[in-house]
């Protein structure tokens, strides 16, 4: 979770100031350019981040259930060491629950919070990481002892009636006078494992796609409505983006800058340029992804048309209005050199053999392999290539 | 040396390495607070929306209200199961208690995780963002609502028709005409007309 979360931050290219939150000091991975290959890279890292986070919910609940007796111990701490440990547990437990809650709300579009989501989720994660590092540094020896105290085979062979509590220890989790077990250890394992599996069945389809999408019963990305060529998810409708329909009609022009002067192209001119077709995945920060066949003009060709031979970067501007600050503004995105020059990076005009629909970014949208979905800017109005 | 260690242990309550771990961990936490603007924890306009308030409320609500409640419920379930067993005069292979516990846990987990989707808490925001307002839409665009589906379903008449005889309205004098899309659902006839149009051009989109 930690690794994929930190990778997701890097995927938004923080060196252009477009990863959220913008100011994180040392609290990030060392700067590197997010690769554009393999094309499924972001789909994988973000799918794992969201998918694993969901699957771990029952595991976290079971873990907290197993230690809850310690919560009610009186007095709560007997030494300075225990006071500090208790405070670190607030970071650990508060952190993980905050991350799960904000994550679950976000992927279901429930924006009931007022704070900037990315800032809260990112720093909440770091609070958890601090608590987690303290916790594993202190508890790994105890965990190893606990795992070694009983063989897995024995656990799997013991039924409820033969299940006995562990020996009582002063700082252990066993009650002074435990009642007979109401569930075997293997039963608890099966319950937690089964819950995790159930959550996987209910959620993984949004990333895997195909037939598995039909088992995604409770997430927004399990719903499809028709079998048309553009029946795949979007993250923002044209209406929500405030697209002025007059601006994308016959009057629409793509402006390319960065060369000796601006180059204006209408949609017919773009369609007359060499067309490139590629089957590429598009993955969203909310974990869902989908693979479609896109066709349009290569970004490298557009750079050449603008008069920029080897661009350092490209700033893509959309017609969409500047959005709600709580979840970030994506009305423009800066692409790295490797993303502009990738052989499949394009300004798509068509998808699956038809013109882009309004919600998929008509008249033209960016598609770059392994780029976070929201940076594949829709309703593009201009591209500014940065020359060397 | 061991005398010193023993004294430290008596004073602190654990090994010096424990303290070292704590110092390292809390230094990281301190740096996080220094980097992050702690004002974000507090909403001056609505104090109850502050993260700090939510955390405190969650702790109190769960640990002091919800936990005792479901612990008592499980105890009662145990008593009921024992009574039933006594009546049947024999041990059941699987305690009846787990037949209630496991389905409850499964549905509880589903409800907890997918609460926003199930109660459609996010859909108000989503619908507000996706339309159902009075947007001005040119004639070639037909917008329809489907009663049972909250989200606006939008069919776009593809731009491929521009200039073709099947797309005459765009060439009417005065440029594109606009139509206000009201909150009221369209008539069935209009809805079918929109569908037919999209079928003809092959470019339509849902939602």
Image (cartoon, rainbow, N blue to C red):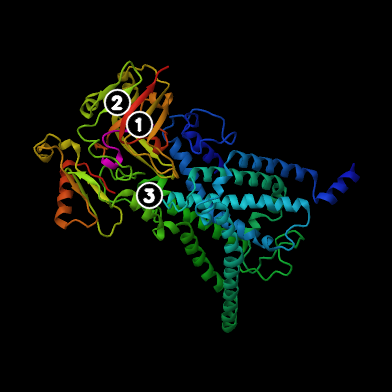
A112 vs B115, nearest the viewer: A112
> For the residues marked 3 and 1, what is the alpha-carbon distance in whole angstroms?
27 Å
The residue labelled by disc 1 is A317
Badges 2 and 3, same chain: yes
**Residue B147 coordinates in the image, percent (x, y):** 25, 59
Which residues fall within the magenta stretch? A357-368
**Residue B17 coordinates in the image, percent (x, y):** 77, 43
What chain letter is assigned to the residue under label 2? Answer: A
What chain letter is assigned to the residue under label 3? Answer: A
Disc number lying in front (3 or 1): 1
Q: Left or right: A326 with respect to B20? A: left
> For the residues marked 2 and 1, what is the alpha-carbon distance in whole angstroms?
10 Å
**Residue A343 coordinates in the image, percent (x, y):** 36, 25
Q: Residue at x 36, y 55 (%)?
A: B124
Q: Left or right: A199 with respect to B201? A: right
Disc number lying in front (2 or 3): 2
Badges 2 and 1, same chain: yes
* Position of A191 relative to A315 (above/below): below
The residue labelled by disc 2 is A255
Q: Residue at x 43, y 29 (%)?
A: A36
**Residue B150 coordinates in the image, percent (x, y):** 30, 56
Mark 2 / mark 3, whichever is N-terminal? 3
Q: Secondary structure at mark 3?
A: helix
Classify the position of the N terminus of chain A by image quarter. Answer: top right
CB within 8 Å, label 2 to label 3: no
Mark 3 / mark 1, whichever is N-terminal? 3
Visible in this render: residue B88?
Answer: yes
The residue labelled by disc 3 is A221
* Position of B185 relative to A124 (above/below): below
Classify the position of the C terminus of chain A by image quarter. Answer: top left
B101 vs A164, nearest the viewer: B101
């Amino acid at each position: 979770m930690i690794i994929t979360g930190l990778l997701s931050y890097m995927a938004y290219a923080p060196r252009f100031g477009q990863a959220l939150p913008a100011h994180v000091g040392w609290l990030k991975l060392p700067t590197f350019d997010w690769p554009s290959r393999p094309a499924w890279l972001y789909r994988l890292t973000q799918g794992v981040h969201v998918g694993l986070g969901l699957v771990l919910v029952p595991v976290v609940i079971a873990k907290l259930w197993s230690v809850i007796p310690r919560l009610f111990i009186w007095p709560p701490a007997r030494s300075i060491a225990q006071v500090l440990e208790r405070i670190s547990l607030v970071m650990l437990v508060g952190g993980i629950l905050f991350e799960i809650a904000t994550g679950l709300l976000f992927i279901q579009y429930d924006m009931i919070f007022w704070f900037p989501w990315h800032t809260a989720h990112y720093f909440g994660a770091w609070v958890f990481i601090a608590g987690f590092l303290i916790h594993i540094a202190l508890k790994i020896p105890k965990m190893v002892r606990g795992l070694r105290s009983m063989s897995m085979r024995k656990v799997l062979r013991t039924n409820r009636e033969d299940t006995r509590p562990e020996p009582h220890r002063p700082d252990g989790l066993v009650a002074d006078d435990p009642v007979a077990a109401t569930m075997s250890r293997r039963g608890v394992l099966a319950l937690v494992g089964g819950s995790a599996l159930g959550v996987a069945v209910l959620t993984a389809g949004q990333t895997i796609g195909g037939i598995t999408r039909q088992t995604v019963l409770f997430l927004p990305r399990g719903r499809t409505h028709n079998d048309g060529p553009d029946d795949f998810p979007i993250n923002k409708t044209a209406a929500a983006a405030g697209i002025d329909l007059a601006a994308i009609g016959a009057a629409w022009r793509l402006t390319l800058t960065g060369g000796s002067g601006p180059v204006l192209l209408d949609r017919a001119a773009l369609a007359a340029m060499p067309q490139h077709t590629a089957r590429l995945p598009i993955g969203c920060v909310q974990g869902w992804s989908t693979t479609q066949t896109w066709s349009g003009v290569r970004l490298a060709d557009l750079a050449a048309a603008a008069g920029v031979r080897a661009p350092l970067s490209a700033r893509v501007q959309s017609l969409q209005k500047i959005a709600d600050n709580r979840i970030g503004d994506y009305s423009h995105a800066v692409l790295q050199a490797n993303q502009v020059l990738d052989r499949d990076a394009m300004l798509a005009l068509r998808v699956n053999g038809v013109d882009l629909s309004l919600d998929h970014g008509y008249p033209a949208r960016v598609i770059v392999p392994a780029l976070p979905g929201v940076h594949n800017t829709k309703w593009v109005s201009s591209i500014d290539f940065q020359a060397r | 040396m061991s005398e010193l260690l023993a004294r430290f242990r008596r004073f602190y309550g654990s090994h010096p390495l424990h303290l070292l771990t704590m110092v390292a961990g809390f230094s990281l936490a301190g740096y996080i607070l220094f980097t992050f603007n702690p004002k974000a924890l507090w909403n001056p306009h609505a104090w109850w929306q502050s993260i700090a308030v939510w955390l405190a409320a969650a702790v109190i609500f769960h640990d002091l209200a919800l936990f005792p409640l479901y612990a008592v419920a499980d105890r009662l379930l145990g008593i009921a199961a024992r009574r039933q067993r006594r009546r049947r005069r024999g041990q059941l292979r699987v305690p009846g208690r787990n037949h209630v516990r496991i389905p409850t846990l499964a549905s509880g987990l589903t409800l907890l995780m997918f609460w926003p989707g199930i109660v459609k808490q996010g859909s108000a925001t989503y619908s507000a963002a996706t339309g159902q307002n009075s947007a001005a839409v040119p004639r070639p665009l037909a917008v329809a609502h489907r009663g049972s589906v909250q989200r606006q379903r939008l069919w776009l008449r593809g731009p491929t028709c521009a200039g073709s005889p099947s797309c005459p309205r765009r060439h009417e004098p005065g440029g594109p005409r606009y139509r206000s899309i009201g909150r009221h659902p369209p008539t069935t006839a209009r809805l079918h007309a929109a569908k037919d149009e999209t079928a003809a051009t092959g470019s339509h989109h849902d939602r």
